[in-house]
Image: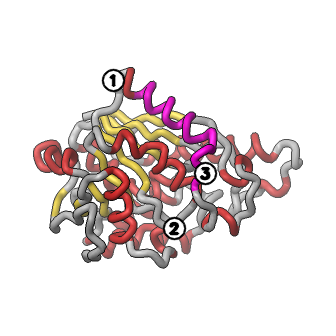
Amino acid sequence: MKILVLSPHRGTAAFSLSLSVIGWLAARHSVTILNVFTRSLEAPYSDADFAHPNDRLSYVSAMRRREDELFLHRVPGAKGSPMPTNIQMVDLNLKDAPLRLRCTQDELYTLAVNPADPAIEKIRKSLARQFESGKVEALVLPLGLGHHVDHLTVREAAFPEAAHLPTAFYEDLPGAITTLESPDKVAVDASLQISQPLTPVFSASTSNAVQTKRRLALAYPSQIDSAEADLISNFAARYDASERLWANPAWITLAESSQLSISRTQPIPPDSGVQQN
C-alpha cells in the first residue's frame, strides 16, 4: 500500500510516527513523507545565531534538510539496510508561520487558520499531483494537538481528501505533550469535519520501541535536546510502547489485513463529545 504522510515541519513525522513508519515498512508498504513548511529560521539548538541575518534562512533550511536525511538513514530497514523498503521525502518548500504570517513564536499557538492563506491551495495542489501520479492509497495527517497554526493549516487543507481515502490522524509531538486539550476531544472535532467516526488505533509492537523512537528523534539536534527526546520517546510508553492514531472507517477496514495498525477500543462517533481513554 502507498501511504502518504503529511508532516507540517521537518521532524514532525519522525517525532510523532517513527514507530508506525517502521511497522509500515516492515509490512512492505511504501511511505512518502510530504514536508510542507520547510523554509524556516527556527533552529533553537544550533549555531544558527552566528550566521549572517541574510544567510540564516538558507542556512537553517539546509541544516534541517540534512537532519531529515539522517532520519531516513536511521530508520530500520531504510537505506543501507538489507531489509527492502520504500521510503522517501518530498518537500513542498513553503515558508513556516513566522515567515508566512509574520507572527511571533507565542502567536503560533493562538492563531486560527486563515481560509485565505495561499498555503492551503498550494498544499491541495500538491496532494492532487500525488493522487494523479498514483502515489497515494492511504493518507496520514496531523491531528493538530498543541494548536500550532501550521499543523492546523495542513489538517484543514487535507480534510477534503480524508473523506475519500483510508485516513488516520496522528497525535502531534511534541505538541501532544504540552497541550491542555484532550486528544479525544480534538479527534471528535476532526471527525465532525470529515463526517466520519474516528477510531483510536495503535502501531504494531517493535523491539526496543522507546529506545528506537528516542534515537530517531535525536536525528534532529537543531530542534530538540536530550531531555525533549526523552519526553518524545517516553510518550510511547503510555500506549504500551506504541503510537496512537485516529482512523476513519476505510482505514479500519484495511488495518488488520494490511498491517496498518492494531485496534483496541471502540470508535468515537462524529456527533459525540464523550472522551475515551
Structural distance between the alpha carbons of marks 3 and 1? 30 Å
Q: Give the quarter of the image for residue 184.
A: bottom left
Tag 3 and tag 1, C-beta contact below 8 Å: no
Q: Which amino acid, by three-letter code, is at mark 1?
A: Gly
- The residue beneath circle 2 is 146
Where are the magenta residues, as a range? 113-130
Q: How crowded is mark 1: few (under 14 residues within 10 Å), some or many (20 or more)?
A: few
Q: Which amino acid, by three-letter code, is at mark 2?
A: Gly
Q: Residues within 10 Å of mark 3 (few under 14, many from 20)?
A: some
Give the foreground label among 3 and 1. 3
Foreground of the two, 177 or 180: 180
Structural distance between the alpha carbons of marks 3 and 2? 17 Å
Residue at the spot 38% in from the left edge and 55% down from the top edge = 17
* Residue 201 visible in the snapshot: no
- The residue beneath circle 3 is 114
Label 3 residue SS:
loop
Q: Position of residue 32 (x, y in %)?
A: 40, 36
